[in-house]
């Protein structure tokens, strides 16, 4: 049995991850972590009596081999660092790690030859969208991204949109997009700007997680879209990460790199 700790277990995704482990042969939930809990009795969360419940990083003392993280952009760096320092393979879904933080975490994992996976999106439709968008950008350098999420989301842009922009930026020729003399008569109406790629974030009730990548060419356009209608859509990717993470010895970014 591979023992797993879930950080953010009281959240929307953490709760799904806890159920995934219960339903997946060969894995066992050994601990959970979230701050400001009303109780540390596992029974109060429907968990087995031997599951440890932690409220702070400082008190975590676990034999878990894998750390699943669905917490907050402000918490994920410290959590991942803690996991690596304690030889626990991180499987990170939380968004918001900066490039320099990822580089530092990869260095620490490499020194320990510890496997880990950071995936801004565990959904297959989003993984494929990013891959297809990267390919399309070689032929259509004019591109904008619209991401649409539920109105409880704390971070913008989404990690997926930022990753999409980074992947497109790797292949597209640097070039001026749009009118160089453009002015905004309403502040920020053109969205965020990642190396000239504009990202627009929509937050609405009823939405879960959706993204469109719009390419424009002379007399034609290409739109690539993915929709996660249910958070269950992310769990097949988390399951893949659980099975792969102990077979690698570096911290990999992007689910597509372990498929
Ligand atoms: N990679 C992927 O496929 C997906 C990633 N996400 C990302 O996962 C993260 C969590 O999303 P949700 O579950 O919707 O959020 P949520 O707000 O429902 O849950 C957050 C959880 O983190 C806990 N938490 C807060 N501060 C913490 C800390 N310092 N240490 C440990 N736990 C802490 C909260 O108590 C709660 O249990 C977000 O960054 C979101 O963008 C969400 C869906 C899919
Ligand atoms: O907060 C969410 O819900 C999601 N977060 C991730 C992101 O920021 O890209 C993945 C997915 O979009 C759902």
Image (cartoon, rainbow, N blue to C red):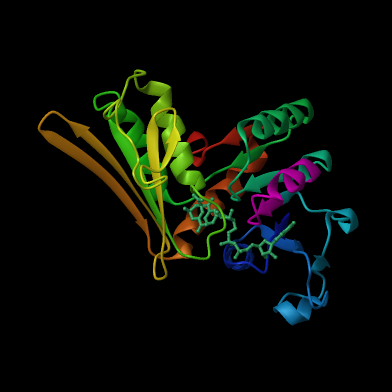
Q: Which residue of the protein is positioned furthest toward the front in this rendering?
A: 185
Quadrant assignment, res 34: bottom right
Residue 26 in sight here = yes
Q: Which residues are magenta?
A: 67-82
> Residue 151, position in %: x, y?
48, 65
Whether residue 225 sits left or right of residue 81 in the image: it is left
Q: What residue is drawn where x is 60% and y is 45%?
A: 96
Q: What residue do we see at 83% from left, 39% from top? A: 85
Q: Kindly identify the residue that appears in the image at 42 percent across and 37 percent down.
A: 164
Residue 136 falls left or right of residue 14: left
Q: Is residue 62 above or below residue 20?
A: above
Residue 15 percent coordinates (x, y): 61, 68
Point out the quarter of the image occupied by ligand 1: bottom right
Q: Of 96 and 45, which appears nearest the observer?
A: 96
Instruction: Tell which of 84 and 159 is nearer to you.
Output: 159
From this view, report whether residue 36 is shown above or below residue 258.
below
Q: Residue 100 appears at what percent x and percent y?
A: 66, 30
Residue 234 position, x and y percent, is 48, 56
- Was residue 36 drawn as part of the magenta stretch in this picture? no
Residue 1 seen in render: no
Query: Where is the N terminus found, in terms of image quarters?
Result: bottom right
Q: Residue at x 63, y 67 (%)?
A: 11
Residue 130 placement, left or right of 109: left
Q: How many marks?
A: 0
Residue furthest to the bottom in view is 44
């Amino acid at each position: 049995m591979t023992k797993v700790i879930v950080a953010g277990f009281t959240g929307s995704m953490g709760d799904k991850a806890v159920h995934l482990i219960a339903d997946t042969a060969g894995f066992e939930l050994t601990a959970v972590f979230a701050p400001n809990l009303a109780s540390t009795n596992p029974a109060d969360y429907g968990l087995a009596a031997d599951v440890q419940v932690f409220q702070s990083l400082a008190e975590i003392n676990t034999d878990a081999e894998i750390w699943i993280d669905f917490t907050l952009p402000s918490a994920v760096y410290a959590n991942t660092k803690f996991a690596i320092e304690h030889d626990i393979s991180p499987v990170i879904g939380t968004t918001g790690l900066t490039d320099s933080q990822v580089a530092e975490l990869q260095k620490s994992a490499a020194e320990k030859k510890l496997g880990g996976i950071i995936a801004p999106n565990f959904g297959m439709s989003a993984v494929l969208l990013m891959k297809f968008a990267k390919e399309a950008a070689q032929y259509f350098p004019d591109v904008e991204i619209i991401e649409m999420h539920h109105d409880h989301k704390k971070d913008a842009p989404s990690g997926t949109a930022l990753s999409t922009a980074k992947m497109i930026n790797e292949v597209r020729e640097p070039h001026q997009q749009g009118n160089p003399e453009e002015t905004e008569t309403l502040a920020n109406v053109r969205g965020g700007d990642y190396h000239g790629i504009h990202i627009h974030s929509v937050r609405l009730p009823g939405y879960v997680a959706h993204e469109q990548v719009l390419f424009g060419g002379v007399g034609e356009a290409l739109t690539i879209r993915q929709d996660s209608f249910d958070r269950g859509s992310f769990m097949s990717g988390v399951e893949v990460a659980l099975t792969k993470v102990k077979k690698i010895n570096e911290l990999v970014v992007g689910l597509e790199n372990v498929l």
